[in-house]
Image: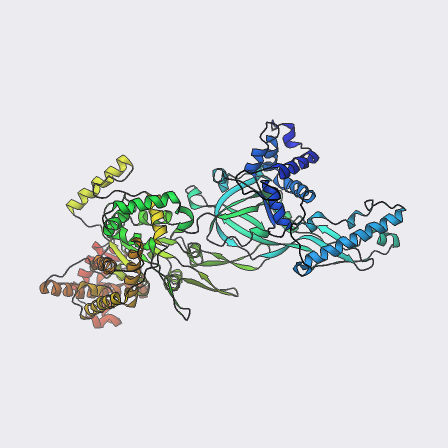
Amino acid sequence: MILNLPKELYMPDYDGERKMCTDFILGYTDPTIQEDPIHGKHKYMIQLQKIVNKESNFINIEIDDLSEFFNTARDSLFVDRVRNNTMRYVTLFSQAIDKNMPLPSVNFREDQMSTFEIIMQQRKFNYQQYLMSQNQLNGSGENNMPTDSKMILPPELERTYQVFFVHGMNAKKIIQRMRDIRSNQIGSLVTCKGIVTRVSDVRPCIQVAVYACEVCGFEVYQIVNTREFTPKVECPSRKCMTNQTKGQLIMQIKSSKFVSFQEIKLQEPSEQVPIGHVPRTMKCIAKGLNTRKCGPGDIVTITGVYMPAPFTGFAAMRAGLSHDTYIEAFNVSKDKQNFKESFLSQENLEKVDNLRSSCESDFQLYSRLSSSICPEIFAMEEVKRALLLLMVGGVTKEMVDGMKIRGTINVLLMGDPGVAKSQLLKHIATFAPRGIYTTGKGSSGVGLTAAVTRDNITKELVLEGGALVLSDTGICCIDEFDKMDERDRTNIHEVMEQQTVSIAKAGITTSLNARTSILAAANPLYGRYNQKLKPHENINLPAALLSRFDLLFLLLDQINEINDQNLARHVATVHRTLKAPVRDDTLIIDAEIMRTFIAKAQDYNPIIPADLHNYIVAKYVEKRKIQREGIDEQSYMYVTPRTLLAIIRLAQAMAKLCFRDIVNQGDVDEAIKLMDFSIRSLRNMKAESSQEKKKIMRDERMTDRMSQVIQAVRDIMMNSGESSLKSNEIQKKLEKSYHSSMKITEEELMDVLTFYKNLDVIYFDQDKNVVFL
């Protein structure tokens, strides 16, 4: 297919193009900048003056400025050629800048000169001596160019700056999806957005290799534009050629020119990945000033040139006609490191002030904010309040000796299927600035923490961050938490308390930051929650892991005619209007205003006064006493020092929401209220009289007995190697086994088997054999 393009677009005159580059550098003026005493409002001449004065070492040429300067119909094609053949125009602009570089306006002493500048001065002196010797040999006094072109100083060796093309104010409008960058854009200027999954170490990359001949002493220069190059061996100077004794070239590392080099692995954002597709990845090369600008987990926008990377050696034989591609970065900018960088605009701050003034009290504001979290989900006011405090977080403390006490809040939602646990997790993951949503079944240990991979360039082992590392200073939402493998689940213990990930793999021993809040969801072990069993028996999670969560909410699908009717009406209204029903008592707050509110709240670091410390201590001692005596339903959840720290964190988060620097008693009471609700939801029963307490204790003993019996039956079948057994055979094996001390009667065994059959734990086949599901 032949493109119907103007002749000037694909067959440019580079001498004329270089003149246009010069005209732009010398002639563009920006009326919005401050006037310079030397160059006035000439924007790019001011930048060149800073370069020659050693105040800067780069020049950013904006595409918007080019479009404004070349605004005629014919000259506008110049901007298109810059976009489509960017690397060539980097060279043309560099040549134009070299010829029009102004003189320095400040004087530099010799002790302020770098080693490279001193070497360059000596090179220029030697170069002048070489010119004079060549002119004497030619018999003329004129400074003619030498016939030996290998001895000419390359301009790349003298340049102390980098030229970058960037977009101006309209940069956000031209961001492309990573999967929309095609092969027809090779060599063009592109802008894409993604999340950084891995960055390599910063290493020196050679730009100009300098060799010295061991016979004639001349310096030979080799410009390196590729990833790999073959060093020169024989001296190409005319002196060595005349004497027919070619000297061997020795590379001079100290006099060669190097630039910083870093490889960035960019992954497509989750919101741009179609359902069922694998996220695309893109390799980016950052050089010079663009190195060390991002880390794993950062969401960045990269502007650069889409370049091919042909394979070499045996890799080229295996690859055939295919090539790898990468982006040579011109500009790397973080999109949203935290709430502050994205939402704290003056307009949003004014809306936040109006929101606070419209509420009569702090509690009303607190209720409105919590109700605005996922308003399409019916009820769950306490759970939404806990999620609001989770996004705000407490205050991280660092002791004098370096020990840290985390300020992040961890929440676990567990209960029956279909109570909107996953919807809450996905909403929080998209709402948070660095939110990661993953599932326990689809994540391995290295997928959550870090994986050891081999660098393609240096062939060294490097770390690639997982979900917990990528969500540093954010929120990691883990669904199906109970479906994780036991070995993978243990990796989260350190993250939830110490906020770090310790790695000791393949000779790499290090710790990565994982200062993340964990919001997890788990389903019951047997499909439905059995209220006769304890929470860790229903959820199949160890108590050591459950204690690391500040709040645990049990969400049950209980049959209640009034609640069922209200829920059905709410769901029907959402399906009909595609939005949450309008409530008279609480107005829904816009999501962007909420993000701004939370961003501003995170600026506060409230402290707890001394008199309030005694109040918190009294409440904690009271809860410990209740647990020891076992006179309340709270005995079903252990009260540990972690519970005390959780109350402090929740109270500090509550004070942050109210924009206060001091925690008051109301904040502590709200934290204890959420803690009590969490405990009551786990207990899910109330013992209001001594008779009911005795009944509960009797039911608990019965439940423990039934659990022992069914566990004994499970052990018998596993030891026998049979998948099914009759009840009378089970009875005989129980009498002969170590379980005989339990003295299980046949009637009791049948009652237990019938009970667990109704729970769909076991079933009876056609031959009346017992089979475990």
The residue sitting at 26% across, 35% down in the picture is 576
Question: Which colouring convention does the figure follow?
Answer: rainbow
Front-lying residue, 620 or 412: 620
Report the label total.
0
Q: Nearer the viewer, residue 140 or 713?
A: 140
For the residue pair 354 and 667, the one nearer the viewer reads as 354
Work out whether 86 lies above or below 53. above
Quarter containing the N terminus: top right
Q: Quadrant of the C terminus?
A: bottom left
Q: Does residue 72 appear to the left or right of 572 in the view shown?
A: right
Q: Is residue 727 above or below residue 329?
A: below
Residue 186 drawn at (x, y percent): 59, 39
**Residue 266's spot in the image, x, y percent?**
50, 49
The one of 692 and 211 positioned closer to us in this rendering: 211
Is 509 drawn above or below residue 140 in the view shown?
below
Q: Is residue 148 left or right of residue 626?
A: right
Left or right for 686, reference 528: left
Residue 719 in which image quadrant? bottom left
Res 182 quadrant in image: top right
Q: Is residue 599 visible?
A: yes
Residue 60: x and y in percent read 58, 44
Residue 755: horizontal and vertical position, in percent? 19, 58
